[in-house]
Structure formats: structure tokens, C-alpha cells
Amino acid sequence: MRNLTLALLNTFSTNNVDAIIYPEQKNLVVKIGSASQSGRNGILAALTGTPVVTVPAGFSEPSEDAPIGVPIGMEILGRPFEEEKLL
């Protein structure tokens, strides 16, 4: 995990940003019985120890897998120990 953390810190520094914003999941719906949830982005903060805030960002269009749509979340990932900038 150290390499991942260093790569993330380098991304913050190289791009001179305090936060990175991205969708919480790449896949809107994980089918019941799926072996994994590989489309989840939410694990980055847990693996690197960085602060993150997840906020609602809207709803998906209805689909065969989600007839009424599903809530979509957005994550705002911050630099280590800079939680106040996320709030």
C-alpha cells in the first residue's frame, strides 16, 4: 500500500491540488450474487489513509438492472490530515 500512497501524494503535488473528485462507483449496480465489487472506487481512501467525504450527486437513468434508477455518489478525496479543507 505504500507505493499506492506515494503515487497518490505525488498526484496531489504534481497537479497542485488539494482534493480529487471522482464517482464513488464505476458500476451503478452490483448484481446480487456477484463474486466481487471491483467497480468500487471507495477503497482508495481506506488503503491510503487519506480523508474522504462522500456526497450525493444525483440519480442514474432507469435501466434493466435498476428500473427506478439508483443514487449516484461523488467522493472528494483530500490530502492526509487536511480534513478541514474537505468540509
Image (cartoon, rainbow, N blue to C red):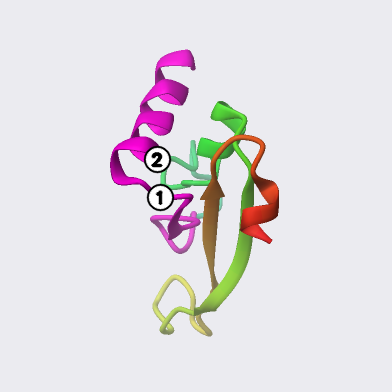
Classify 59 as above or below 53.
Answer: below
Q: Is residue 2 magenta?
A: yes
Residue at x 49% of width, y 37% of height: 36
Q: Quadrant of residue 70?
A: bottom right
Q: Within 10 Å of the Cα at label 2, are there few (<14), some (14-19), or many (20+) other Cα atoms?
A: some
The outermost residue toward the left is 14
The numbered dot on residue 87 is none
> Circle 1 is placed at which residue position?
17
Residue type, mark 2 in image: Phe
Q: Give left or right: position of 55 versus 22.
A: right
Residue 45 locus on image (x, y percent): 57, 38
Q: Give left or right: position of 36 versus 55.
A: left
Residue 26 locus on image (x, y percent): 39, 55
Q: Nearer the viewer, residue 6 or 16?
A: 16
Alpha carbon distance from label 1 to label 2: 5 Å
Residue at x 50% of width, y 56% of height: 24
Classify 10 as above or below 62.
Answer: above
The magenta span reads 1-30
Residue at x 45% of width, y 63% of height: 28
User: CB atoms at circles 1 and 2 under 8 Å apart?
Assistant: yes
> Circle 2 is placed at which residue position?
12
Q: Nearer the viewer, residue 44 or 9?
A: 9
